[in-house]
């Protein structure tokens, strides 16, 4: 089973930087091929990867503020997993280095929400102004007819 840890792209949410896939399997037959693909030699490594997966499913803001537990798990896996997987997990374990990017993304997300709200309000005001302009036109034409 291929388990994805997805954090949406920046334009979708402020919780956006990464999309990680970690291969974890419970089926007997699939486990062997998954283990070979990742170079997993022990149940302990698989357990640590599952722990890391559970950790990464937490709120991204919390992980960016404090990724110490991810670092601890990563250190136990270092040197026991393939280099490409280790490189990916290194980024996961050091999310704190992305605090500034995260804060900027949160601000952009808030700015977009504010912009959308202002645009909606502006369209409503424009619609109201058009309705009032029509009413004024009707009243002026009625005044002209009465004269």
Image (spheres, rainbow, N blue to C red):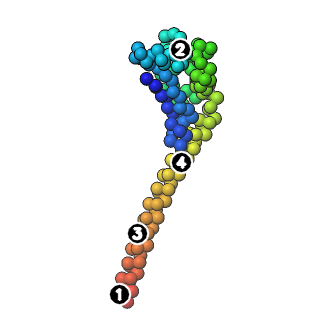
Residue annotated with mark 4: 112
Of the numbered discs 4 and 3, the one sitting upstream in the chain is 4
- Most extreme residue toward the bottom is 147
Of the numbered discs 1 and 2, the one sitting upstream in the chain is 2
Of circles 1 and 3, the one toward us is: 3
Residue annotated with mark 1: 146
Q: CA distance from mark 1 to mark 4?
A: 51 Å
Q: Could you tell me if the residues under marks 2 and 4 are in contact, i.e. CB atoms within 8 Å?
A: no
Element type where label 2 sits in the image: loop
Of circles 2 and 4, the one toward us is: 2
Identity of the residue drawn at 42% across and 70% down: 132
Residue 19 appears in the rendering: yes
- Residue placed most toward the observer, 136 or 127: 127
Judge from the rendering whether residue 1 lies leftward or rightward of residue 60; answer left or right.
left
Residue annotated with mark 3: 131
Of the numbered discs 2 and 3, the one sitting upstream in the chain is 2
Label 3 crowd (10 A; few <14 / some 14-19 / many >=20): few
Of circles 1 and 4, the one toward us is: 4
Element type where label 3 sits in the image: helix
Q: CA distance from mark 1 to mark 2?
A: 91 Å
Marking on residue 40: 2
Residue 131 x %, y %: 40, 69
Instruction: Report the quarter where the N terminus lies.
Output: top left
Residue 48 appears in the rendering: no
Q: Could you tell me if the residues under marks 1 and 4 are in contact, i.e. CB atoms within 8 Å?
A: no
């Amino acid at each position: 089973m291929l388990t994805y840890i997805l954090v949406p792209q920046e334009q979708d949410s402020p919780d956006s930087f990464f999309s990680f896939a970690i291969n974890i399997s419970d089926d007997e037959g699939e486990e062997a091929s998954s283990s070979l693909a990742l170079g997993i030699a022990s149940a302990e490594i698989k357990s640590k990867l599952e722990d890391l997966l559970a950790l990464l499913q937490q709120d991204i803001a919390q992980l960016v503020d404090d990724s110490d537990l991810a670092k601890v798990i990563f250190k136990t896996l270092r040197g026991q997993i393939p280099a490409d997987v280790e490189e990916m997990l290194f980024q996961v374990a050091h999310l704190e280095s992305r605090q500034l990017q995260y804060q900027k993304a949160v601000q952009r997300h808030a700015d977009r929400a504010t912009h959308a709200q202002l645009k909606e309000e502006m369209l409503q005001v424009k619609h109201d102004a058009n309705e009032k302009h029509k009413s004024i036109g009707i009243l002026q034409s009625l005044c002209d007819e009465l004269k």
